[in-house]
Amino acid sequence: METSLLMAAVIAAGFILITGPFFIPELHKLKFGQSIREEGPKSHQAKSGTPTMGGIMIILGITLGTAIAAPLSTEIMLALFIMLGHFVLGFLDDYIKVVKKRNLGLKAKQKMLGQIIIAVVTMVIGTRMLGIDTSVWLPIANTSVNIGIGYYFLVLFVMVGASNAVNLTDGLDGLASGTMAIAASAYAVVCLLLGHNDLAIFCVAIVGACLAFLRFNAHPAKVFMGDTGSLALGGAFAAVGILTHTEVLLAVIGLIFVCEALSVIIQVISFKTTGKRVFRMSPIHHHFELGGWSEWKVVFVFWAVGLLASVAGLSLL
């Protein structure tokens, strides 16, 4: 088992470290540059034109590492399907924005339709082939509650929530990739403790890929992962939570992602109802930036909080 875990991490990381120096210049040539929103922090304008869609490397690395190191069980195939399904949605979104020069990318309805299809396939295979029931485990009470048909809506909520939350977190150099590496490390332990050894290999491949990507994504970033990477990583995070039946624990370990998403929801509701903003800017990492924190400080503090959240999540087991 130790050999498989190491192999997955090394292959995923090695793929990115080897292909990065060749892939990133190609993105430059194709002019797949990131456009920076004008209302964002002024310091971010210098990042305009930095290549995006680097998530292609991340997802290929994870897929390769998992396929080689893990047995292609139903559980692994489903996890890869969920991740790659979100990868396709993210790629189309980036392609429309970067290549077709349409700022909004995929429409919200189109994304939702794609995620509904992924969720339906997940539940059909999960319930019929993997024996997943409709109960939810409550960590603190250490009990399971059967919520019946409500579980199907929970699966969709987890997928949409996780993928979009990681997407929102991807706003500073290295923030999403580093936070994801920490969360995936914690979930590798969760998988091992609960006997999902194949999924642990998948998680370790995510860790290897995200850490290797930091080689090119740490401040100042040479490449961004784009929606191609962030939506897919969010989908992968949702997959391990659903397949280990620890959906509530997912929110604890992924506390940073939850806070990022909540900050946007709170900001929008507050502005539409009162005309006032709660934060200087959302997602919340921009709030701290505009408060005078350097980009590196925000990233390191968020990584530290993510690490503490992961330890707290593991302690609940």
Image (cartoon, grey):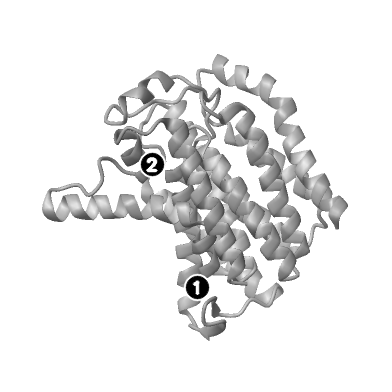
Determine which of the numbered discs, if any, sits on residue 137 in the image: none
Residue 126 shown left or right of residue 40 in the figure: right
Q: Where is mark 2, residue-wise?
A: 285
> In the rendering, at what x and y percent does residue 314 appear?
61, 65
Front residue of 70 and 316: 316
Residue 92, compared with residue 123, is above or below; it is: above
**Residue at 85% in and 54% down:** 2
Can residue 121 be seen here? The reply is: no
Front residue of 95 and 66: 66
Between the C-alphas of marks 1 and 2, the distance is: 32 Å
> In the rendering, at what x and y percent does residue 99 appear?
47, 26
**Residue at 58% in and 31% down:** 54
Residue 217, compared with residue 278, is above or below; it is: above
Q: Residue furthest top?
A: 29
Task: Identify residue type, mark 1.
Answer: Tyr
> In the rendering, at what x and y percent does residue 234 appear?
53, 51
Determine which of the numbered discs, if any, sits on residue 152 in the image: 1
Q: Quadrant of the N terminus?
A: bottom right
Count residues near mark 2 (Cα–Cα under 10 Å), then give few for <14, some for 14-19, many for 20+. Answer: many
Residue 273 shown left or right of residue 118 in the figure: left
**Residue at 55% in and 80% down:** 134
Q: Are marks 1 and 2 in contact (CB under 8 Å)?
A: no
